[in-house]
Image: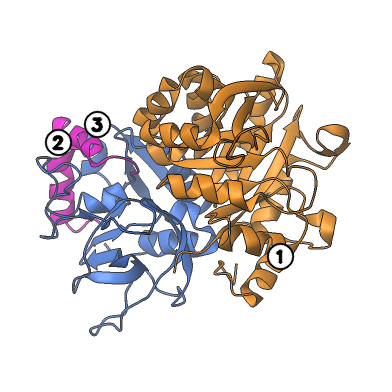
Amino acid sequence: MLTKRIIACLDVHAGRVVKGVQFVDLVDAGDPATQAARHAREGADEIVLLDITATHEGRQTLLDTVRRTARELFVPFCVGGGIRSARDAEQVFEAGADKVSINSAALADPALIGEIGRSFGAQAVVVAIDARRDPQAADPVGDAQVFVHGGRKPAGRRAVEWAREAERRGAGEILLTSMDADGTRAGFDCELTAAVSQAVSIPVIASGGAGSVAHFADVFARGKADAALAASIFHFGVSTSRSLKEELAASGVSVRLPC
Amino acid sequence: MRVTVIDYKAGNLTSVLKALHHLGAEPQVTDGDLALVDSAERIVLPGVGHFTATERLGATGLTGAIRAAIARGVPFLGICVGMQWLYSGSTEAPDQPSLGHFSEVCTRFCEGKEKIPHVGWNSLEIPPGNGAAPRLLAGVAPGEFVYFTHAYKAPVTPDTAAVTHYIEPFAAAVERGNVFGVQFHPEKSGGAGLRIIKNFLGAPC
């Protein structure tokens, strides 16, 4: 049986893993290669490394970080943050990533999705969507809006419609972050996740709002998510992906165990 | 050991090379140097993406060299699209010639309520052997999870070494003689995947 994936996300700044609440009060949380290997050992089904440094010098540091992280990592490895062109993506793949996550660049130039997909396969292209419900709309969920530049700027697109276009253009997966839920630890936005997941045939990874094991069970059941991102699972007393999965299995979610 | 990895611009080459290095093999890569196929002690054909990518194998003469190496008894492992290439074709690119070592044709998952492609970790069911235990999967526990990402698959036949269920049962692994194929990505399947690659490296010539 196909299992629900638990994806460990590492935010990386200047070559180090950082933790913080909405990028405020960044705390050094170690070496990315070491942390990624630990997450894989502790049962994560996949690793996402998000580069939150947006400088030119940061790119070279990132490539070096990706190279070191990929070397001893034998689970799927996705890298995102600041990938603006097919050439950027190619460098990240050459450094050892299996997938790239693109966000603002895909909205600015949707053809980029197909361009990367043609060279590296659709499975290698994850389109990340940061979305917020539109309280003004008749259907706040169905009309949820997409934002770019770290959530500061509206993209003028609806999340559901953009996800459909991304799929049509050759995206392999959608990484959907609910900006309303992000940082709240009050649960994923299951309605929004379900709206996007049911609109596309490709897998949808839910992100934003995880605060308890029950939230994960909920986003898999009600939210129809195929995978969920766990950036700060340690904040609510679950020490590892494995223990999270053990609790999910006990509540009837199909996960990869033993792992 | 001279492990030759075929480069036909199929995406997961870096990951496959990393796994081989990790297991102590010294892979050499060819995108057209037939001498590296002729001298190979093992051949790995990676792959991910569209079946049309395999067109390059015919165009560069690699298909003929691989066919000859297989006939000499050199162990061969095809991964994902590399496995599908071992069959007589795929409906993804119906006119695209392939190796035809296995006579069946690969087909797309049936449309329905499940998502296509099949992406993620799914379990291996190892059918009761008809005599010989599967060599590629030696030591792999039934039910072990491996990582898949594909929309086309090969049918279950007597050569199937492992079956996985998604929408319908399909061949997750195939083996006959010195020819092996896996639909999943052993280079991305943790310890179980590394064990499978190790088994392949240890397969008798």
> The magenta stretch spans which residues?
B47-74
CA separation in Å, label 3 and label 1: 55 Å
Check disc 1 and report the residue beneath it: A214
Amino acid type indicated by mark 1: Ala
Quadrant placement of the N terminus of chain A: bottom left
The colour scheme of the drawn protein is by chain
- Give how far across and how far down residue B41 sits, in percent: 29, 51
Q: Secondary structure at mark 3?
A: loop
Real-space Cα distance between discs 3 and 2? 13 Å
B60 with respect to B138 (left or right): left
The residue at which mark 3 appears reads as B33
**Is A45 included in the stretch rendered in magenta?**
no
Viewer-nearest of discs 3 and 1? 1
The reply to whether dot 3 and dot 2 touch (C-beta < 8 Å) is no
* Picture coordinates of residue B27, whole percent (x, y): 40, 43
Q: Secondary structure at mark 2?
A: helix
The answer to whether residue B57 is magenta is: yes
- Residue reaching furthest to the front: A138
The residue type indicated by label 2 comes to Gly
Report whether mark 3 lies on the same chain as mark 2: yes
Question: Which of A175 and A78 lies nearest the eye of the viewer?
Answer: A175
Q: Chain of mark 2?
A: B
- Mark identifier at residue B58: 2
Q: Please rate how many residues cluster around mark 3, counting C-alpha atoms within 10 Å: few if below 14, some from 14 to 19, many from 20.
A: some
Label 3 amino acid? Asp
Give the letter of the blue chain: B
